[in-house]
Each structure stands twice: as structure tokens, then as C-alpha cells.
Image: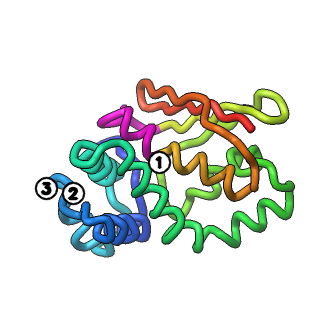
Amino acid sequence: MAGDYEVSAHYVSSLAKVLEHRRLLHASPSPAAPLLESPWARWWWPGSLAESVFVAVGQQAGPAAVREVVAELLQQHMLPGLGPAVSWLLSLSGVRPSTLFARMDLLSTTLLRGVSFDWRADGPSAGVLRVRYPSPAQDPQVLAEVWRPIFEQVFHLTHTAGEVTGIDIADGVLEARLSW
């Protein structure tokens, strides 16, 4: 798909493992079957295919299942690899959520391409993170459910009580309001 973003084979492989563990592997539509059956067949996959997997999970099992899949994906497969980068960032700038929100582009480079991030602080304990995709989401609500546990994980990593106070999506831009 022209103008598509991409997700790494590592991301896809990890997603397939989580879906298999949760018995949701076959919830995905047929266009995404090659993605999940042979995640290492390519280094980068069209993001729209991965997105269609989350849409199918949401349709089959509901929004809570989408959040649970992403949370497990982060805990079991993504954070162990990102741990050194996160530790390095926190040692440089302290343990504030804004440190990680401002560096989402750096943290996502091995997993995601073609998506940009823009952090704007609204004082010392709040801000807005914009996640820009090259095209609109297949299902904006599902995209919001994918990102919510990622934002919550930032609060967990920084040992900060925080919350996602709102997520809006329009024209390929997810805007999350975050406070702590």
C-alpha cells in the first residue's frame, strides 16, 4: 500500500507469539495470514497488515483483548530488548514520563518506520503526544486501544502514577493527552 508505515519482523514475530498464547492467532483476516505464519519472511512488513490483525482481535474479542495483547507484547517481547535504551535515557534525564514521551521516535526505531512522534509539554506534569501515521487508521478506536497500554507502560517504567486523560484520532494523527 502506498504511503504505508512498516513494522519490523521482530514486532510481527512477537505479535504472533502473543496471539498464539492467547488463542487469538486465527482472529486475523486472511490478508494478514502470511505476516503471522512467516514473520521472518521479510525484515519489514506493511503496518496496515499488522493493524488489520488488531482490528480483527477487536472485532472477535473486544477492546479489552486488544489492550491485553499489547500489554503482553510489551512485557514479554518488547521491553526486554528496549531495556538498555530506556535505562540509558532515564540515567541521562531522570525518571520523568516526559523523558520517554519526548523520545518515542528513538524508542520505536527498531520496531516501527514511517510514523512520527511529537511531544508537547503542558507544564511539568502533563503533555500531548501526537503520533502521525501516513494515512488514516483502519479503525480509530482499535488504534487508541493499541496505544493506551504503551502510554501506561511509560508511567510504569518511570514509577509514576499517571493517566491517559484522552485520545483523539483524526486524519492519521493520534493525539494523546497524558498527565501525572
Q: CA distance from mark 2 to mark 3?
A: 5 Å
Secondary structure under tag 1 reads: loop
Amino acid type at image mark 1: Gly
Write down the quadrant of residue 31 in the picture.
Answer: bottom left
Residue 140 in magenta?
A: yes
Residue 37 in magenta?
A: no
- Image marks 2 and 3: residues in contact by CB distance under 8 Å: yes
User: Residue 30 got which mark?
Assistant: 3
Q: Which residue is drawn at the image coordinates 56% and 59% (left, top)?
A: 109
Point out residue 61 in the picture as x, y percentages from the top left corner: 26, 48
Describe residue 68's horizontal placement relative to residue 79 as left or right. left
Q: Which residue is drawn at the image coordinates 84% and 64% (left, top)?
A: 91
Describe residue 41's horizontal placement relative to residue 132 as left or right. left
User: Residue 123 got which mark?
Assistant: none
Quadrant location, the N terminus: top left
Q: Which residue is mark 1?
A: 114
Q: Which residue is mark 2?
A: 32
Secondary structure under tag 2 reads: helix
Point out residue 56 in the picture as x, y percentages from the top left corner: 24, 48
Residue 130 visible in this rendered orientation of the protein: yes
* Mark 2 surroundings: few (<14), some (14-19) or many (≥20) residues within 10 A: some
Amino acid type at image mark 3: Ser
Boundaries of the magenta span: 133-146
